[in-house]
Image (cartoon, rainbow, N blue to C red):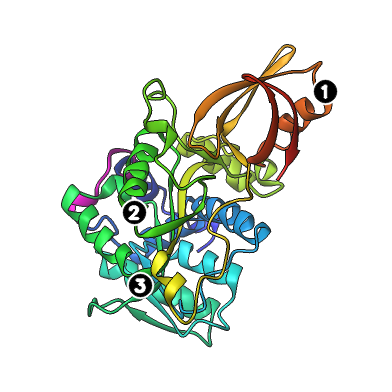
Amino acid sequence: MNWQQLDWAALDRLRAGFLHGVGDDGPYWHSESDLASYDLTYGERIGWKWDAVLRELASRGWRPPASARTVLDWGCGSGVAGRRVLEAFGVEDIDLLQLWDHSPLARSFAAQRAREAFPSLAVSEFADTGQPIGLLIVSHVINELSPDAVQTLLALVARADAVLWVEPGTHAVSRQLIAVREALTDAFNLIAPCPHPGMCGLLTAGNERHWCHFFAPPPAGVQNDSDWVRFGQRAGIDLRSLPYSYLVLENKRLATSAAGPTSSPLPPTGASRILGRAEHFKGFARVLSCDAPGVVEELELQKRADADLFKQLKKDANHPLYRWERADRRIVGATRV
């Protein structure tokens, strides 16, 4: 598949379905051409979100537990999430990639693409036998699932050693993912994005309008690429805007297993995470900060208090973790974490 072969009618239909949630209406993949066109366009944009998550995990030295020798890409679609994860972590310690989607076409397409990318890796469709799951990958599915389907997915999550879960960065989807987080904190350590293991601070009164989301940078040159520009115009999307929400989890049972956990369960002590990105105004910037005690609040930085930090928050908009120096709700300095 290349840009000249794109099935625009299929992409328009898929886009309309994704915006309204189509999971309960059955498989929406009608042909291999649907999947190939999606994989080159919308799927690649999802891949950029996964790249952002995986870069942060790498910067913190996190890898899947040694026990996670099988990878399950659940709701795989074209398989872009599974491929991105395997590219990031390598396949040397992986015995098997398993794929599940309610569409047989999707399972077949994702398996073929995975075999092309990783010829030495065993790839199969997932058949649930009730066995433990190594690394579970979930990507862009939650707004398509019924409440019963969410519970089915959470039952799989409970059996996983580790979970990588990325979703669109909308208010509604983020709030759904927060509900998942709250349901899993007793059994899982929160690797990211949370700087604390307690109740999500966005659930406190007064924070209803906020949500936990971040922005992935597109690859350099995309905005000047004629094929991507045409796609963005046709799809009605901003190529610069890639909002996402995510969770990275490790099962607490690993702490007592022979393999043991592979990483610290939380970001460095005292870290605060910027939700969304800093807003800049004349003479000051405002951030929505999620702090280690589980407090989410808006903080302001006066440009005159730290001009270098003011510029950094604008230039380095995708770096989310800082240690603030504060005077009440004003930032007077900070250290990148």
**Residue 184 badge:** 2
Q: Which residue is drawn at the image coordinates 53% and 85% (left, top)?
A: 119
Q: Is residue 192 left or right of residue 75?
A: right
Q: Which residue lies furthest to the top in this view?
A: 282
Residue 268 on image: x %, y %: 64, 50
Q: Which residue is drawn at the image coordinates 56% and 22% (left, top)?
A: 298
Residue 45 on image: x %, y %: 52, 50
**Residue 307 badge:** 1
Above or below residue 110? Residue 336 is above
> Which mark lies nearer to you, 2 or 1?
2
Q: Which residue is drawn at the image coordinates 47% and 62% (left, top)?
A: 81
Residue carrying label 3: 99
Say few, some or many: other residues with alpha carbon within 10 Å of mark 3 (under 14 / 14 to 19 / 20 or more): many
Q: Which of marks 3 and 2 is nearer the N terminus?
A: 3
Identify the element where label 2 is drawn. Answer: helix
Above or below residue 44? Residue 172 is above
Q: Which residue is drawn at the image coordinates 41% and 38% (left, top)?
A: 200
